[in-house]
Amino acid sequence: MNTHIVPKVILHEHIEGSITPFMAQQLANKNNIVFPESLCYKAGQYDVNEYKNGRYRYDETDFIQFIQTYDTVSNFVKTPEDYYLITYDFLIRNAKQGLIYCELFLSPFHICTTEIDGEIIWNKERFQQTLNQMDNAIIDIQKVYNITVRYHVIGVRHLGAKIVYDTLRFIKENPHRFITGFNIAGNERFGHFDDFKDAHELATQLKLKKSYHAGEIESAESIIQALKHGAQRIGHGIRAIENNNLIQELINKKVTLEIALTSNRILVNELHGDIRNHPVRQLYDYGVRITLNTDDAGIFGTDIEKEYHLASSIFGFSRLELLDITLCGIDAAFVEDSVKKQLTNYVLSFFTLDDKQTLQKAVNDAIYHPAIIERFIKYQKSLPITS
C-alpha cells in the first residue's frame, strides 16, 4: 500500500535526535569540529534505500553505544542558528511525506545551561534565540507546506528532581507561545514519578499538558505511575501489553500511546531486535489509541513515511486504520481546539469513496473493538457531504 498519500502526525520527536549523518557532517564542518571516522558507515556499507540520509555506526543491541552516538551527535550543535538548520531539515523531510502536525521535544537544560563553580546557570537570552531560530525554520517550511508545530519541554529525569523542577521554573519565567507540553524523559530507571511531585504540580499550574515517557524500558507499572501524576499521553508505553487492567484504563481514559516502531525495535530488549515481536497490532486491536512516531529520526535512520510503511507492511494496518491513527494523533495533540478541528477536517477530506465504503462496512460488521467503532461512527458523522 502507498502510505505517502495518507496525512501523518508526529507527537514524539527529540530535536537533537533528528540529526541525520549528513546534517551532522554539515554541523561539524560549520563549527570546526572533528567528525570521527567511526561515527558513520561509509558509502557502499549500508542500504541507501533504507537509510537515505546516511547511517550511524553503532551496535543496535548495545544501549550504551546508542547513548554515546546520541551524545556525540548532539555536541555538534553549538549555536541557535544550528537549531534552525536541524529543525528545518527534519520538518522539510517529513512534510514532503505528508506530515501535517508535529510536536518537537526540547530540553532547556541542554540548550542553555552552563555549570560555573558547581552552580547551574540558565541563559535566558540563548534560550530565546534558539526558539526564535526554530520558529523561523517553521515559518519558512510553512511557506511551502501546510504544517503545524508545537514544542514540549523536557525534564531529564536522570539529572534529578531538582533539575526537572528548575526546568519548569525557567519556562515559567520564559514562556513561549508554541510550548504547550511538558515531558519527563531520560533514563526510565532513574527516579520514580513520585519523586517529581513539585514538577507535576508546577506543570499543572502552567497549564502545560503532560506526556511522560514510560513503559518502554520499565514495566507496565511505570505507565500506571505516569497516569497517576496526570499524564494525558504516554511516550512509548508498549509494556502496557503486560497488564489487562491497564489496557482497559487506557481505553476508558482515551490515553494515547506515542509508539515508535523503529526506535522500540532497537532499544527494547524484550523485542529481541525483531520488529515482528512489537505489540502495536495487539494494542490497537484491543482498542488502545496509538500514534506512529520517529522518536530520534536521525539516529535511528527513520522518518514518518518509513514508520507508516512498517505499520502497513509488517503489521497489516489498512489505509482506514492508518487514517484512524492519524486522527487519534490529532485528537491527542497538545494544540488549541480550533487548530484540532481544522486538522481533523483536513484529514477527513482525504477519505475517498472506497474509504467511506470500508468505514461503513467496518461499522456494520462490528469487526473492531467498540472503542474503535465509536471513533469510526464519529468520523462518519463528520465526513464532508459529497454528491
Image: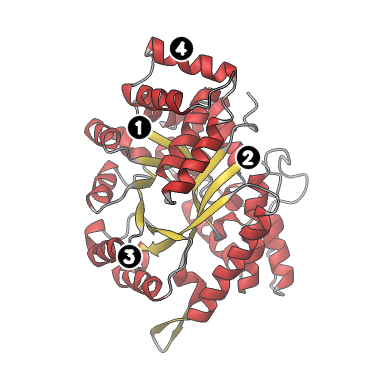
Determine whether, in the image, residue 185 is placed left or right of residue 292.
left
Residue drawn where x is 47% and y is 64% of the image: 177
Q: Residue 288 carries which label?
A: 1
Q: In this view, does 59 lie above or below 368?
A: below
**Depth check, front residue: 276 or 26:** 26
Secondary structure beneath dot 4 equals helix
The amino acid at mark 3 is: Leu
Q: Distance between the residues labelled 3 and 2?
A: 32 Å
Residue drawn where x is 39% and y is 64% of the image: 156
Residue named by callout 3: 206
**Depth check, front residue: 322 or 351:** 351
Q: Residue 361 carries which label?
A: 4
- Labels 4 and 3 touching (C-beta < 8 A): no
Tell me the mark number nearer the camera, choosing from 2 and 1.
Answer: 2
Residue 43 appears in view: yes
The amino acid at mark 2 is: Gly
- Labels 4 and 2 touching (C-beta < 8 A): no
- Labels 3 and 2 touching (C-beta < 8 A): no
**Depth check, front residue: 19 or 366:** 366
Where residue 20 sits in the image (x, y, percent)? 65, 54
Q: How far apart are marks 3 and 1 (CA)?
A: 28 Å
The amino acid at mark 4 is: Lys
Q: How far apart are marks 2 and 1 (CA)?
A: 24 Å
Residue drawn where x is 38% and y is 85% of the image: 119
Determine whether, in the image, residue 294 is placed left or right of residue 188.
right
Residue named by callout 2: 98
